[in-house]
Amino acid sequence: MVAFLARWTVTSIALAVAAQLLDGIGFDGPSSGQAELEEKLLPLLGVALISTLVTMFAKPVLTVLSIPFILITLGLFLLVLNALLLLFTEWLADLFDVGFHVDGFWAAFWGSIIISITTWVLDALLGVDD
């Protein structure tokens, strides 16, 4: 349970970083000040929960199914897979009307890179294990 909460927290921070750095990823609502924090905190936690669950359950299956593509592309297909999972997370969040948006594949691609790097750094700093 503690590992799940740690993963959820790290994913929340990584999503917030990606939303701040990229114009193509964001949440509906105010764009600055206290109102932004108040209105976007719960949607951020909701999207992070969805992303954490997608990463826990869908990513391992898709990674195994993608092994030929991963080998042929020397691992670069994992970047595409991560981008597709971010788009899937957006789709799931839209089903719950969370107000999270990713503007196309390239925003998802760069966002998944930012999320991966941020997660990697936070995992190293906090000692979070999968």
Image: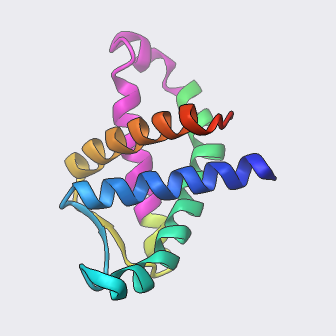
Q: How many discs mark residues in the rendered view? A: 0
Q: Is residue 75 above or below residue 16?
A: above
Q: Main secondary structure of the magenta part?
A: helix
Q: Please report the bounds of the magenta region as a residue range.
A: 65-90
18 left or right of 61 in image = left
Residue 54 at x, y percent in the picture: 58, 51
Q: Nearer the viewer, residue 53 or 69?
A: 53
Image coordinates for residue 92, horizontal then vertical, percent: 49, 66
Coloring applied to the structure: rainbow
Q: What residue sits 56% from the left and 39% below the top?
A: 59
Instruction: Answer yes or no: is residue 90 visible.
Output: yes
What residue is drawn where x is 48% and y is 41%? Answer: 119
Quadrant containing the C terminus is top right
* Residue positioned 43% across, 74% down in the render: 94
Image location (x, y in percent) of residue 110: 25, 43
Q: Is residue 19 above or below residue 113?
A: below
Q: Residue at x 51, y 40 (%)?
A: 122
Residue 53 can be seen in this image: no
24 to 2, vertically: above or below: below
User: Residue 81: horizontal and vertical position, in percent?
Assistant: 41, 36
Q: Is residue 88 magenta?
A: yes
Residue 81 falls within the magenta-colored stretch: yes
